[in-house]
Amino acid sequence: MVAGCSYPESAPEMDDYDYRARYPLSVESEVIAVTFRGGAGGLMTEQERYALNLIVADYKDRGQAPLTVVLGGSGLNNETLAEDIRSTAVDNGLAKSEVRVGVDPTLAADNVMISFVSHTAVVPECGYWYRESYTEWENANSVNFGCSSQHNLGLMLADPSDLTQPSELDPRDGQRTAVVIDLYRAGEITGAEWNESDTTISGVGE
């Protein structure tokens, strides 16, 4: 009798309870690569210079460091072109550490390839109301619950690669740390002091 009245055990599906599992965000990566050959004097042609400006703008918008400049063959034939590309990219706002120059013997000797990795967030599509929420007796989340939040979050990401690996934290301010420790040792307030005054909300800005 007891066995006949028992309910079968089953593990809950996370999709039923967690909107992040039901509507996950993912990342697609692709390599953007363009090959330059240069012109007179080994420098970029006007068309290549214009193309490089577009590449740098695209890199700033959605690229992942570094911007790679690869010389073909032994690298001796296009040193001038590679330096022209590197210096122009830096002049357009990139840090010197973002532009890396290398050599690829498998690339044609008269070519210089510029490339970077681009990450794009893949967001869920929302608006599928294939179940009526008012007829449900489980008191569970609606089918579309959380979809728009995930969709908007993916569109707002400045760096979609944060979905797979968080960015490194900036180093701690050593000077500020030393000040706080000295104040603490002296028994003084380490944070900002609250200034109590008679200022009212209506008087702000007057």
Image (cartoon, helix red, strand yellow):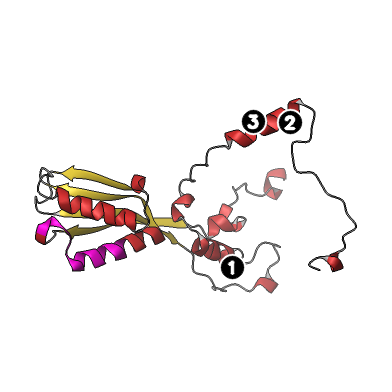
Q: Are marks 1 and 3 in contact (CB under 8 Å)?
A: no
Residue 45 within the segment the image draws in magenta: yes
Residue 194 within the segment the image draws in magenta: no
Q: Which residue is mark 1?
A: 144
The residue type indicated by label 3 comes to Ala
In front: 27, or 205? 205
Where are the magenta residues, as a range?
41-55
Lower sequence index among marks 3 and 2: 3
Q: Which residue is mark 2?
A: 183
Q: Quadrant of the N terminus?
A: top right
Q: Which mark is residue 178?
A: 3
The residue type indicated by label 2 comes to Leu
Lower sequence index among marks 1 and 2: 1
How far apart marks 1 and 3 lie (CA) works out to 51 Å
Task: Locate residue 91, reporting x and y percent.
Answer: 33, 56
Q: Which mark is residue 101?
A: none
Q: Residues within 10 Å of mark 1 (few under 14, many from 20)?
A: some
